[in-house]
Image (tube, rainbow, N blue to C red):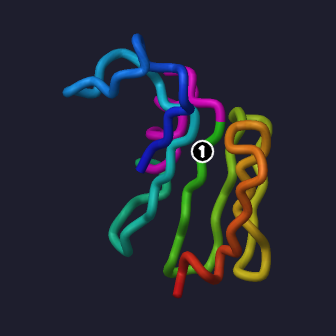
Amino acid sequence: MSFVATGRFPDDKVPDDFGDLAPDLAVEVLSPHDRPRHALDKVGEYLEAGVRLIWVIDPRHGRAVVYRSLSDVREIGTNDALDGEDVIPGFHCALRDVLS
């Protein structure tokens, strides 16, 4: 899943294809068969493309990892909240609500 803030599309029109615009937020939900290295490679690609905030949600282990860069990484547990930070100001969602 991805999110692009209002005003980022030319003429405020959502394009028919993915275009060249990096989303503001990217969300990856891991399947039981995803390899950790594959997920980290995707995170690197997102960051390189200019994605500002990435949530990698791991339902199997009841956690999420939040990336702002490869050095600004934090893990949250089921009792913590996904936070939109400055990308989606005011957005907060308990991880347990996403996982249930």
Q: Which of 52 and 65 is in front in this view?
A: 52
Q: Quadrant of residue 31?
A: bottom left
**Residue 40 position within the rendered picture, expressed as x and y whole percent measured from the top left:** 52, 45
Disc 1 designates what residue? 54
Q: Does the magenta stretch include residue 76?
A: no
In this view, 83 is above or below 12: below
**Residue 93 position within the rendered picture, expressed as x and y whole percent measured from the top left:** 68, 68
Callout 1 environment at 10 Å: few (<14), some (14 to 19), or many (20+)? Answer: many
Q: Which of 61 and 10 is in front in this view?
A: 10
Q: Is the magenta stretch mostly helix, strand or loop?
A: helix
Question: Residue shown at 51%/20% (left/top)?
Answer: 8
**How many marks can you see?**
1
Report the amino acid beneath label 1: Ile
Query: Which residue, as the protein is rendered here, is positioned at the far top?
Result: 10
Q: In this view, does 97 lie to the left or right of 22?
A: right
Question: Residue shown at 49%/41% (left/top)?
Answer: 3
Question: Residue shown at 47%/24% (left/top)?
Answer: 22
Q: In this view, does 81 lie to the left or right of 62?
A: right
Q: Nearer the viewer, residue 55 or 61?
A: 55
Q: In this view, does 60 lie to the left or right of 79?
A: left
Question: Residue shown at 69%/37% (left/top)?
Answer: 87
**SS for callout 1:** strand
Q: Give the range drawn in magenta.
A: 39-52
**Residue 29 position within the rendered picture, expressed as x and y whole percent measured from the top left:** 45, 62
Q: Quadrant of residue 71?
A: top right
In this view, 92 is above or below 17: below
Q: Nearer the viewer, residue 38 or 20?
A: 20
Query: Which residue, as the protein is rendered here, is positioned at the far left?
Result: 16
